[in-house]
Image (cartoon, grey):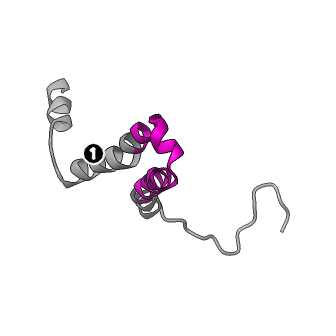
Amino acid sequence: MELDRRAFLRSVGAASVLFSLEVLLGVVTPMVMLLMAHVRQTPSLLFTAAMLIVLGSLPLRRRSTAAAPVRSRPNRQAPGTAP
């Protein structure tokens, strides 16, 4: 059983490559950029780092909303309320 889990972790597919790019471009690169004083003092580089953070989080938000659609419940009362 443990061997099957390890094999799954080493598999490379489109999702794992895209996730790696998302983490690299949306988290690691801006973090390294913002650690440099020169980047924090240059408005255009600071804007670039901020946009990498914002744009790097968009695929994550898109996946989470697509994976869990909200279903509306018409004509339902909240628990503990009288009709």
Q: Nearer the viewer, residue 38 or 28?
A: 38
Q: Nearer the viewer, residue 57 or 72?
A: 57
* The quadrant where residue 28 appears: top left
Q: x and y percent of residue 77 in the render? A: 75, 65
**36 above or below 16?**
above
Q: x and y percent of residue 6 in the render? A: 18, 29
Question: In this image, 29 relative to 3: left or right?
Answer: right
The amino acid marked with disc number 1 is: Ser
Q: Which residues are magenta?
A: 30-58
Q: x and y percent of residue 5 in the render? A: 20, 31
Question: In this image, 37 relative to 82: left or right?
Answer: left
Q: Residue at x 16, y 36 (%)?
A: 10
Q: Residue at x 26, y 53 (%)?
A: 18
Q: Residue furthest right?
A: 82
Q: Residue at x 23, y 47 (%)?
A: 16
Q: Is residue 50 magenta?
A: yes
Q: Nearer the viewer, residue 76 or 19?
A: 19
| On-image quarter of the C terminus | bottom right
Q: Nearer the viewer, residue 45 or 55?
A: 45
Q: Which residue is mark 1?
A: 20
**Which structural element holds mark 1?**
helix
**28 above or below 81?**
above
Q: Is residue 8 magenta?
A: no
Q: Residue furthest bottom?
A: 74
Counting the numbered discs, the total is: 1
Q: x and y percent of residue 23 in the render? A: 35, 45
Question: In this image, 6 relative to 76: left or right?
Answer: left
**80 above or below 72?**
above
